[in-house]
Image: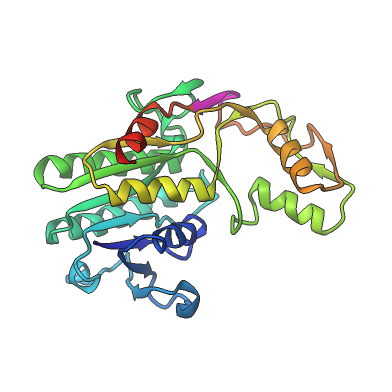
Amino acid sequence: MRIAVTGATGFIGTHVLAELSKHLVDIVAVVRRNAPVDRAALRTEVIQIDLQNPPDNAFALLGNPDVLIHLSWDGLPNYGSLHHFERELPMQYRFLRGLVQAGLPALVVSGTCFEYGYQSGKLSEGMETHPITPYGYAKDALRRQLHYLHEKRSFELIWTRLFYVYGSGQAASSLWSQLQLSVARRDRIFNMSGGEQLRDYLPVADVAKHIVMLALHRADIGVVNICSGKPTSVRRLVEGWIKENGWDIDLNLGYHPYPSYEPMAFWGDRIKLDTLLEGIQ
């Protein structure tokens, strides 16, 4: 089996490559043209493609992969930027449609819990989506476009709807990275929100493992939440990180306001994910 991965040098992409390397598959890392790439560090075949203007033979250039794991998406973490649907959405669909039309058999795409919008409580795949941010709207629109393409073209589609991911290599603006930076600076306090909001967090290594398992055991399953299924307060999460690592730092709760684009309490339903993983093992 040959698996191509876009966004291969990104936060989740590097962990997906590491997980794929544990399996007997041919891997190709897809990176943007002219992007600085340490090919030795990636330890796999690397193909540079401009997603904005991909070549007509992109599928052949990738070596006719059996599966594409599509993680590439620009413009984050600015969820409110119009870039997401003005530039990213049409570019993404055009690129993926070209591969499908050229014969791509299976596609695994990273979605987001932001597709659910301002809905609270346990969120399941069967619920209607109501995105309220440009980022959530663009991701949801891409999912719908691929659904319609799926009705016209024969290919397997898995839409992995990611909740909150954390771990090594995360963006500097993330909660995890900001806390690590404060500890490294020997700050006495860490400024954060009130921390009472409930979220669904999953370590990036687990996220990568789930994505890879679904990709290896190809199936036309549509949307699946990639989540822990357990609501956790942000305060409890951060306190757990501090205790686990033995860090000496106090929390300054209430320094930052709660985000206006998220409800106070939501988490994922992972019944579908667990059922799929049980069937695979």
Magenta: main secondary structure: loop
How many discs appear?
0
Q: Position of residue 218 (x, y in %)?
A: 24, 47
User: On the image, which quarter does residue 33 sit in?
Assistant: bottom left
* Residue nearest the viewer, comparing 138 with 266: 266
Give me the residue at 28% from left, 68% from top. Answer: 53
Q: Residue furthest right?
A: 188
Question: Does 267 appear above or below 154?
Answer: above
Name the side, left or right, on which 87 lies relative to 235.
left
Question: Does 232 appear above or below 95?
Answer: above
Color scheme of the displayed model: rainbow
The question of residue 218 being in magenta is answered with: no
* Residue nearest the viewer, comparing 81 with 47: 47
Q: Position of residue 80 (x, y in %)?
A: 51, 43
User: On the image, which quarter does residue 39 sit in?
Assistant: bottom left
Q: Position of residue 169 (x, y in %)?
A: 59, 59
Q: Residue furthest front?
A: 281
The span picked out in magenta is: 263-267
Give me the residue at 16% from left, 45% from top. Answer: 149
* Residue nearest the viewer, comparing 34 with 168: 168
Q: Position of residue 121 (x, y in %)?
A: 51, 20
Q: Quadrant of the N terminus?
A: bottom left
Give me the residue at 48% from left, 62% from top. Answer: 14
Question: Does 86 appear above or below 272?
Answer: below
Name the side, left or right, on which 156 lies relative to 165.
left
Q: Quadrant of the C terminus?
A: top left
Give me the residue at 11% from left, 47% from top. Answer: 154
Name the side, left or right, on which 255 lies relative to 67.
right
